[in-house]
Amino acid sequence: MIRYIRRAAGLCLFLLVALLLNAARVQVLQADSLDDNPANRRKNIVRYEQERGNILVDGRPVTGSKDTGEQLRWERTYTQGPLYAPVTGYASQTYGTALIEAAEDDVLSGTDPMLAPFPFWGEITREQQPGGRVATTVKAAAQQAAYRGLGGRRGAVAAIEPASGRILALVSSPSYDPGQLSGTGPAATGAWAALNSSTSRPMLNRAIRQTYPPGSSFKIVTAAAALDAGVVTDVDAPTDTPDPYVLPNTTTTLPNEASGCEDASLAYAIRVSCNTVMAGLGVKVGLSGMYEAAGRFGFNDKGIAIPSWVSVSNFDKDMSNDQLALSSIGQFNTRATPLQMAMVAAAVANGGDLNTPHLVESTATNSGSVISQSATRSYRQAMNPATAVQLQKMMVDVVENGTGGNAAIPGVTVGGKTGTAQHGLDNSGVPYAWFISWAQKPDAGQAAVAVAVVVEDSQARRGDITGGGLAAPIARSVMEAVLGD
């Protein structure tokens, strides 16, 4: 009898050990896969059982949370949602996260290990910390000025502090209220369907995710390339450019909107925006020189993130000379985001040194203890310092004596460049109006802000669309807001 009892006890011990091993396998080895299983609602329940951390502008929250009393308890809310949607993105219980809500999700949701009071505390206790805070670099006054300036028209504004790379404004229009997507059920799914089917594409972040032909605003890049390459040594000397200019190896002539462009100097060509001079200079610099020059400003870089990813601005690597001529005036396949063109203006304003643009100033715990702080990082030396000084003078001349007069601010040094970009089959589309600029107070040692504005105004008459007419006043209001803040 004792022998059978021993066997039964041994079997029970074996089963107990097997049970313990299986429990360890499930709880340790398979924990992550079970957590991530779409059928496991527990992860979402835990995620939404506490308030999400806030995103801050000028130290004040532009987000919040409300208690729904449902199983997914806390739902995201937004203050002035359409104004800040291109910055915050959305945090939806149905559709996930976007932009800062996605890039800083670990901090905002409380899952970042750095939020714990001690190293590895969360790993040991499996305890979720209160959601942290994300402070942005955005200035509320600049954001509001840009949003009001666009007035619901399709377009975008990006503003950067040249000395630091801090993004001061990031606006896309038309916009949307991300709070409509926060919850679950018919309201959220209906809003999602309506927004995604809208012909105005309000959820498209035009400031960082849409590329446009930059038109004549790109001539600043071409001018920098020509000066750095020694193709132009005297900005006031004739460039030996005919008007009309025949595109290389073709019979096609390139027109000018301005007069006096025949054999004009670089300074005059920038002031009145001569297509012929700038196209000819681009060909003289050559494809490799233009490609490398554009790259120093950020074109063709797939790795730019602010921290959300930014669409690649394009300058072709393989072109014929006639295509290069058009590309050098911001046409053909040359395309840029508004943020990219703000980087061009910022590089000029900052003496040729282009700093990496960033949208997050710092992250902190719910109690305010800082866990990360952004620092100024040089992106590239976009041009020689001497070239930057010459371009600064030429851009100031554009505002004071040329096509950019609508951007002038009394008592402030303002540099700018207009652009009217053609697009569509045989340039049949309504042109895009561009303006890039920077502003510096007379008693300051450096520029306070660089701005890029693009307006897609399909309602305006084609002949009325110019960068100086539509976009420059918006840039001026943004610069004034930064200078007065």
Image (cartoon, rainbow, N blue to C red):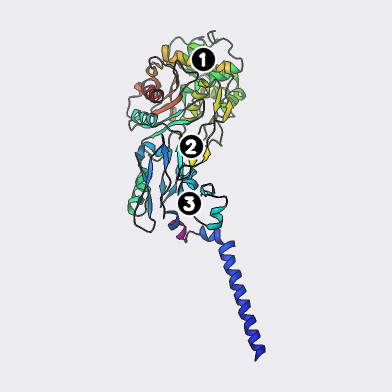
Residue at 51 percent of width and 23 percent of height: 326
Residues under labels 2 and 1: Cα distance? 41 Å
Task: Indicate the amino acid at tag 3.
Answer: Gln
Question: How many marks do you count on the picture?
Answer: 3
To which residue does mark 2 refer?
360
Magenta span covers which residues? 36-44
Quick check: 199 above or below 69? Answer: above
- The mark lying in front, picked from 2 and 3, is 3
Q: Position of residue 98 (x, y in %)?
A: 45, 44
- The local crowd at label 1, few if under 14, some if 14 to 19, many if 20 or more residues have their Cα within 10 Å, is many
355 vs 8, nearest the viewer: 8
Residue at 53 percent of width and 40 percent of height: 372
Is tag 2's residue or tag 3's residue first in the polypeptide sequence? 3
To which residue does mark 1 refer?
277
- 449 on left or right of 114: left
Q: Position of residue 64 (x, y in %)?
A: 37, 45
